[in-house]
Image: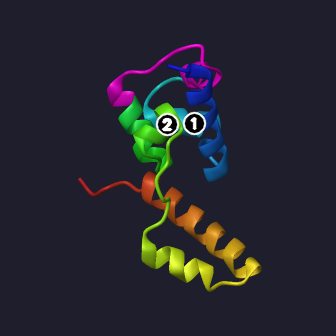
Amino acid sequence: MDWMAIGSRIRTQREYLGYTREQFAELLDVTPKFCSDIELGAKGMSVPTLCKISRILRLKTDYILFGRQEAAFSEPLTLLLESCTDSERVYAEQLLKTFLIAMTTKKDPP
């Protein structure tokens, strides 16, 4: 396992989604230091932690572990984005990021 590459993929997506390390650690229910160790490749993670990371960052576990990524979008979404101008695509990306963060952090009713 290339833990440094795994950590780099995690950090890149965390930053892309706009999470601080502290926010990400809170969502994962771990310490910020542990997140730092994972991102630097100094420590590995358990399968349950990998699954949480996958869910929070909206990444497939294959991509996190091996860098392999299938098509990131479903076909209808790809077609919609391809019909946008560059500026519309940037705006759509910002809206989608905001939506994904809201969905990840929302609390389900008891």
* In the image, residue 38 above or below residue 58: above
Q: Say what amino acid the circle numbered 2 marks.
A: Ile
* In the image, residue 73 above or below residue 81: above
* In the image, residue 96 above or below residue 79: above
Label at residue 10:
1
Q: Mark 1 and 2 residues: CB-CB less than 8 Å, in contact?
A: yes
Towards the viewer: 69 or 89: 69
Look at the image and give the residue range highlighted in magenta.
32-49
Label at residue 64:
2
Towards the viewer: 42 or 36: 42
Residue 86 percent coordinates (x, y): 75, 78
Q: Is residue 60 left or right of residue 20?
A: left
Dividing the picture into quadrants, the one containing residue 8 is: top right
SS for callout 2: helix
- The residue shown at (43%, 69%) is 74
Dividing the picture into quadrants, the one containing residue 107 is: bottom left
Towards the viewer: 100 or 2: 2
Crowd around label 1: few <14 · some 14–19 · many ≥20 (10 Å):
many
The residues tagged by marks 1 and 2 sit, at their Cα atoms, a distance apart of 7 Å
Dominant secondary structure of the residues highlighted in magenta in the image: helix
Q: Extreme left residue here? A: 110
